[in-house]
Image: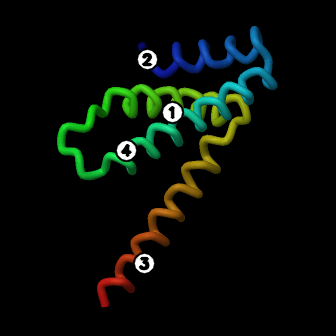
């Protein structure tokens, strides 16, 4: 599936189910990822930890984040802010190394 098809599905999704419903789903998916991360923290020393649930929840969160970015037309702003945050993190890491 290419990006154009994915974008069309996302736009149609919001047209069919509505912004409010998709925002509720986004919150639910974020909460499910938080729960999965918490499970990992409780089992952090287990080398046999099953990451299947985490992969599934990460995919769900990526999908709802893409919905937000596409429907609110935020791609350029998110890209710019992402780059800013990576640069800032790099600077903090360099200070920490000193």
Q: Which residue is mark 3?
A: 91
Q: If the image is split into quadrants, where does the C terminus sit?
A: bottom left
The Cα atoms of the two marked residues, 1 and 4, are separated by: 19 Å
Instruction: Return the disc, 2 or 3, that comes first in the chain's sequence.
Output: 2
Quarter-wise, where is residue 9 in the image? top right
Q: Nearer the viewer, mark 1 or mark 4?
A: 4
In percent of width and height, residue 12 lies at 68, 11
Given this view, does label 1 or label 2 mark the residue nearer the observer?
A: 1
Neighbours of disc 4 within 10 Å: few (<14), some (14-19), many (20+): some
Q: Which residue is mark 2?
A: 2
Q: Nearer the viewer, mark 1 or mark 3?
A: 1
Q: Residue at x 32, y 27 (%)?
A: 52
Give the structural element (helix, strand or loop) at label 2.
loop
C-alpha distance separating marks 1 and 2:
16 Å
Q: Residue at x 67, y 34 (%)?
A: 27
In this rendering, is residue 59 above or below 41?
above
The image shows residue 31 at horizontal and vertical percentages of 60, 37
For mark 4, what is the residue? 40
Name the N-terminal-most of marks 1 and 3: 1
Mark 2 or 3, which is nearer the eye?
3
Evaluate if marks 1 and 4 touch, with contact meaning CB atoms under 8 Å apart.
no
Residue to which mark 1 is pinned:
62
Question: Mark 2 or mark 4, which has the lower sequence index?
Answer: 2
Residue appearing at x 46%, y 46% in the figure: 38
Lower sequence index among marks 1 and 4 = 4
């Amino acid at each position: 599936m290419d990006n154009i098809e994915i974008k069309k599905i996302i736009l149609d999704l919001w047209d069919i189910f509505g912004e409010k419903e998709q925002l509720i789903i986004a919150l639910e998916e974020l909460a499910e990822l938080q729960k999965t991360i918490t499970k990992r923290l409780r089992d952090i020393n287990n080398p046999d930890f099953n990451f299947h649930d985490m992969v599934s929840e990460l995919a769900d969160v990526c999908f709802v984040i893409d919905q937000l970015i596409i429907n609110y037309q935020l791609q350029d702003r998110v890209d710019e802010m992402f780059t800013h945050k990576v640069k800032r993190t790099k600077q903090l890491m360099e200070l920490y190394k000193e």
